[in-house]
Image (cartoon, rainbow, N blue to C red):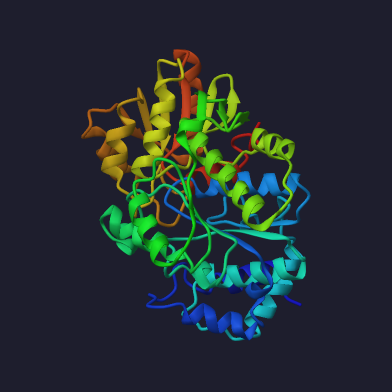
Amino acid sequence: MMTYEQAMQEIQKFSKSGAPLQNLDRIRRLLNSLDNPQKDLKFIHIAGTNGKGSVAEYLTDILQAAGFRTGTFTSPYIREYADRIRINSRNIPEDAISRLCETVLNCHPDPDCSQFEITLAIGLLYFREQHTDFVILETGIGGLLDATNIIEKPLVSILTSVSRDHMQILGDTIPEIAAHKAGIIKESCPVVISPHNKAEKLFRQTAAKKHCEVFTPDESLCDKKETGLEGCRFGYRNAVYQTKMGGMHQIDNALTALETIQVLRQNYDYHIPENAVKKAIAKTVVPARIQIVQTNPLVILDGGHNADGIGVLTDLLSESGIASWIGICGMTNTKDANAAAFQLSLILSKVLCVDGFSGNALPKEQLRNAFVKQHAMASVTELEKALPYAIRWAKGSHGGVVICGSLYLASWYLHQNEVTSPGV
């Protein structure tokens, strides 16, 4: 059997995106050669621009707390490759990756396959052999032509907020992007739509054409909203919930998860106790989602990289009570650096621009120029030197540090143990 290192080398021989797709025939052929593991599994399928990772974690923790063996497939990884495939919050073991990678490769996948497709095949095989009760399945990009859309009859399709991201693939407008996300809606399968969703009308129209029952949280039943960097508190349907993750958007994400649980109870008669729901929501954390990693001075790690994600971050920072923030900012060359600089310059007193955390990182000089155009105090620095400098600056000015701009940058810091463990 190949080693884990050999498996990683084999997976990396495939390109990150694979050849352009017109249909799902490529993943269909691969899974057919593996005896279609997806047909033996029960899925909750999630698509959206922002929020789908948090909704996935809320559902994972709730179903696990209720006693169900729960698989979770997410993208991209944060700390290491294995955290994309988990059962009951435990990463797939390295020996399972090696063994199942060899199984997949022995079926001679199309050389045009992407790393994502190979990883999905490994994940589905693992979930089947481990007899999961549910699989929380997060799309990669889009939905319609996403490899995860090979599944036929999800228990629920969830559509979280939509904003402008991956426009080179999905289109330039919200309706174009939403049309791809709506591709996960399947004939006669329940659909949950997150609150305040810009694409709700299009999603409802698509669901109606496919004879789907649509559920969305009832805002009139949600009250007592309190939010901050360290969590949220809100009432819904005569119950009170506490989240560990901060930001008003986390109330929307939690409500989306709660509505999904109601669908599982009412439409499929699953027993999911309310005490399990409350306990799970109160403990759920997602690495690099406005994550407090140090308190003296306050250091926050966030992977938001599009306009809505960065907007949520800046809103929270402005309401934090901390007057001065220094940002360590890095972005990939596929994101809109000018738009990000415009938003972040409204809240950051000083910006350290970095690169080197990813193969497609935007050169730090270009990122600095984007901030300078916004009259921000910005400079370039080496990635390894940024955090020690920022901490000294924050202590001297009684301010805070925020590491932001890219999930890949957040992943680099977590992997280097530059910051503490998730949720600490």
Name the residue: 64% across, 54% down: 83
Give coordinates of residue 334: x percent, y percent.
34, 55
Please state, as top left, top right, bottom left or bottom right, where the C terminus lies in the image: top right
| Residue 273: % across, % down | 74, 42
Q: What residue is at 48 percent from the left and 69 percent from the top?
A: 187
**Residue 3 visible in this rendered orientation of the protein:** no
Closest to the observer: 111 or 26?
26
Residue 400 image offset from top left, x and y in percent: 48, 22
| Left or right: 69, with 204 as reference point | right
Q: Residue 95 lies in what quarter of the image?
A: bottom right
Q: Position of residue 359 (x, y in %)?
A: 44, 57
| Position above or below: 354 against 106 | above
57 or 76: nearer the eye?
57
Q: How many marks?
A: 0
Against 335, residue 375 (above or below) is: above
- Quarter of the N terminus within the rendering: bottom right
Q: Is residue 375 above or below residue 405?
A: above
Q: Quadrant of residue 10?
A: bottom right
Residue closest to the eye, 323 or 393: 323
Residue 416 appears in which quarter of the rendering? Answer: top right
Residue drawn at the location 35% of the way across and 25% of the way down? 347
Observer able to see residue 422 = yes
